[in-house]
Every structure is written in C-alpha cells, then in structure tokens.
C-alpha cells in the first residue's frame, strides 16, 4: 500500500496530536478523573505505532486485519468514554439521578435502532464480503456514537444537569468528528472505490483533518484549569443536610398513597 | 440505485438534524452558563404567592410537616380559584425550571450545593408529574374532580421549594436575597 506525502503528513500530525494530548492528560492529572478517556487516547497512540510497523514490515492483508481488529477496540472504548462522561453528568449524587437512567437506556435503544436501519439501507460499493461488513459496521458505529453524543447534550440541557467544563469539552471533541464521520462514511459506502482511490482517500483526509483539529481543541481546553470552586462552609453544609431531611419528609407526605418514592 | 439515493438522503437529513440539534443545545447550555442573576430572575412568571401559601398551608406547615388539625379545609372550588386553574398550575411548573437555574447559580459559587440543586430538580419533576396527571384528567373530562388533590400537592411542593431556596440564599449570603424574596 503506497503512502503519499499527504498521507504521511496526516499520520505524523495525528500521532503528535494524540501524544501531546496524552501527556497533557497525565501531566495535568486529568487521567485520574477521566481514566477511560485517557486509556482511549493511550490506545490510539499505541495503535498508530503498531499500525506503522505492520504497514512497514507486514503484508497488506496483515495491515487490513490489524486495522479492523483495532477499530473494534476503538469503538468499544468510545462507547465506554461515553459512559464515563454520562456518569459524571447524570450521577450527581454518586448514583444515577432518578428517571435519567431509563431515558438514557431508551436513547441508546433508539440510537441502535436508527443505526441498524441505516446500515441495512446502505448498500456498500465494496465487492468483497469483508469489505461490505467493514463498511457497514464502520458506518453504523459512526451513526450510533454521533447520535449518543448529541442525545447526551440534549439530555443534560433538558434535565438541568449541566456538563461541567472539561466533560463538555470531551463531549464536543468526540461528538463533532462522529457527526462528520457519518457523512463521510456514507459517501465512502455509496461510492466505494468506484470514483477511484483518490476520492476515497480525499474523504479519509477530510475525516483525519477534522480529527486533528478536534485534538488540538482538546489539547488547548484540557490544558486549561477548570474554574476554581469555593469551599462549602461547614455550617452551610449542615443546614443543607437539614433542609434536605425536612424536604424528604414533606414530600413523603405529599405523595399520593401507593406511589413509589 | 433508488435505494442508494434514499440512503444518502436519509443520511443527509440525519446529519443535518444531529448537527442543528447539537448546535442549538450547546448554545443553550452556553447561554445558561453565562446567565446573570437578573437574567434568570426575569424569566420567573408572575404568580400570586399569597394564594399559593394559602393553598399549601392548608395541607402542611411552614416546615413541610403535616398541618396540625389533620384534614385540609379548603373546598375544591376555592383551590381552583386560588391557583388560577390549570393555567396557574402550568405557570408554577415553568417557574420550577427557573428555580432549578437559580439553584444552579448557587452551585457555581458552591459546587457542593449540588445536593440541594438536585433535590430542587426532583421536586420540579414531581410538580410536572402532578401537572401531567391533571392534563390527562382534562382529556378524560375529570379535571374538576382531580384538580384539588394534585394541584394542592403541587402548590405545597412549590411552596416548600421556594422556602428552601430562600434558606439556601440566606445561608450563602449572596447579595441578591432581596431580589429573590421580591420575585418569589
């Protein structure tokens, strides 16, 4: 597989971006707060190195096999990152806010249904079975991840559980390339290589370019410190606990009989 | 070939819908995070707080305990008039969203006040649940009989929420307590 100068440029830029982001996450102690996100970035760095050596010393088949195997791991990690940021937003008291988990599960079910429907509708221009499965799988995961990230933003705003500074940046940094990825994957599925390898490569370059831009965005925003919170005075803390106790008692009385708390 | 055109069309619509939805809600979240105290207060719809207190204190005392004397005394028609009917109750529901934003404002100063904000949010959801029950009753023609039961509970919950919020602001000593008392 021949690599052009532009391919090499994008590869180096992407590798450097992810490496810098990983250093930022560790040096700024963000890794403690976002262990799955940090693991995903570390995985991407390792994947770039691994794929480089397979490309240089292995066969095309070995490269393709390694690439798609690692792509599955990448998708699994993205879904776990989504869970990580969702748990930081929708579990304000250490457990899922009432009603949110159910809505979130419905959102996942609807997203899976839409992604599966679109994957069924899609007729990839690939001629091989493996290529067809890969393109359909790649496309449906892009749809799923894009939908879930947008759904999470909507849910956080409508339920009054705001995305906090660094969490919001991670959601934006992963959500934007996922949405663009849906369109690019669709075009690649539709045209395949029928318009020549150049078109396919151009689409890939656009996707890599957007990924690189969002990595730079994440590097800059995650390097900055979140606004410093004020310490809660002990007296206020006690009063808040007292108020909550009183409120819970009142609500128990107000609820109609037989209604679950 | 037709199926592929449909596929591309559906994808284009989906991407446009996702992008516009994400943009709209991100801008809304950004606006909310930059809201000023006065801006949030301005969203409070006017309600007659004395009437709400009358309805609520018929059911509970100022601390939220069951009222001494037991059975509520207000007649269904009186509750209906005092709260302004279903429209009045819907206004209370809309104000609950504003109360959550006000609590979130406190959260900006003291993130540990998250517990209170969460409790306020849950109370708002409960009021909306009561309102939804009333809307269901209005569709089946049972509004008049359902109203006093659910509406009085909603009014009492709203009343408690406002008291809790005033207590919270008094504790944090923010310089805006007078404005809040006037608005509530």
Image (spheres, coloured by chain):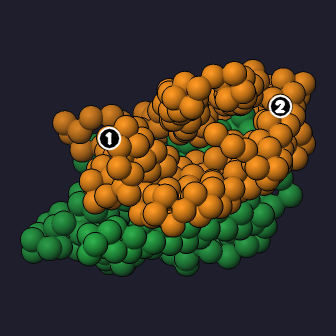
Chain colours: A orange, B green
Image x and y of residue B180, in percent: 71, 64
The chain holding disc 2 is A
Q: Label 2: which residue?
A: A19
Q: Residue B127: x, y in percent? A: 39, 56
* C-alpha gap between disc 2 and disc 1: 35 Å
Q: Is residue B41 above or below residue A140?
A: below
Density class for disc 2 (Cα within 10 Å; few <14, some 14-19, many ≥20) is: some
Secondary structure found at label 1:
helix
Q: Report x, y in % for residue B162.
A: 57, 55
Are the residues flagged by discs 2 and 1 in contact, CB closer than 8 Å? no
Q: Which residue is drawn at 90% across and 42% down?
A: A224
Going 39% across and 70% down the picture, which residue do you hit?
Answer: B8
Q: Which residue: 82% across, 50% down? A: A5
Determine which quarter of the picture holds residue A199: bottom right
Marks 2, 1: nearer the viewer: 1
Q: Name the residue under label 1.
A: A129
- Let me know if residue A127 appears in the view: yes
């Amino acid at each position: 597989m021949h690599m052009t100068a532009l391919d090499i440029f994008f590869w180096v830029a992407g590798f450097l971006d992810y490496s810098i982001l990983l250093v930022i996450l560790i040096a700024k102690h963000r890794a403690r707060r976002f262990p799955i996100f940090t693991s995903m970035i570390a995985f991407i760095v390792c994947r770039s190195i691994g794929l480089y050596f397979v490309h240089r010393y292995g066969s095309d088949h070995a490269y393709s096999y390694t690439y798609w195997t690692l792509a599955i791991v990448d998708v699994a990690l993205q879904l776990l990152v989504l869970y990580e940021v969702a748990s930081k937003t929708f579990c304000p008291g250490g457990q899922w806010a009432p009603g949110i988990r159910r809505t979130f599960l419905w959102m996942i079910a609807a997203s899976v249904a839409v992604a599966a429907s679109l994957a069924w509708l899609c007729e990839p221009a690939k001629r091989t079975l493996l290529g067809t499965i890969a393109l359909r799988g790649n496309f449906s995961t892009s749809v799923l991840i894009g939908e879930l990230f947008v759904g999470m933003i909507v849910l956080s705003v409508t339920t009054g559980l705001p995305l906090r500074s660094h969490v919001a940046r991670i959601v934006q940094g992963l959500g934007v390339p996922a949405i663009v990825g849906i369109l690019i994957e669709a075009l690649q599925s539709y045209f395949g290589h029928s318009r020549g390898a150049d078109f396919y490569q151009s689409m890939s370059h656009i996707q890599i370019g957007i990924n690189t831009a969002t990595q730079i965005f994440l590097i800059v925003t995650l390097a900055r410190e979140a606004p410093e919170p004020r310490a809660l005075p002990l007296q206020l803390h006690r009063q808040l606990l007292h108020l909550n106790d009183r409120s819970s008692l009142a609500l128990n009385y107000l609820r109609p009989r037989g209604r679950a708390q | 070939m037709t199926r592929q055109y449909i596929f591309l069309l559906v994808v284009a619509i989906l991407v446009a819908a996702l992008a516009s939805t994400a943009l709209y809600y991100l801008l809304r979240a950004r606006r909310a995070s930059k809201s000023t105290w006065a801006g949030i207060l301005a969203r409070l719809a006017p309600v007659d707080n004395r009437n709400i207190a009358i309805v609520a204190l018929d059911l509970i005392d100022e601390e939220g305990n069951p009222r001494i004397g037991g059975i509520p005394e207000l007649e269904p028609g009186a509750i209906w008039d005092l709260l302004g009917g279903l429209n009045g109750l819907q206004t209370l529901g809309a104000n609950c969203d504003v109360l959550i934003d006000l609590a979130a404002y406190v959260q900006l100063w003291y993130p540990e006040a998250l517990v209170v904000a969460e409790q306020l949010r849950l109370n708002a959801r409960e009021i909306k649940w009561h309102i939804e029950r009333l809307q269901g009753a209005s569709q089946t023609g049972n509004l008049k009989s359902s109203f006093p039961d659910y509406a009085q509970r909603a009014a009492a919950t709203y009343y408690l929420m406002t008291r809790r919020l005033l207590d919270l602001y008094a504790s944090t000593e923010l310089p805006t307590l007078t404005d809040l008392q006037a608005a509530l």
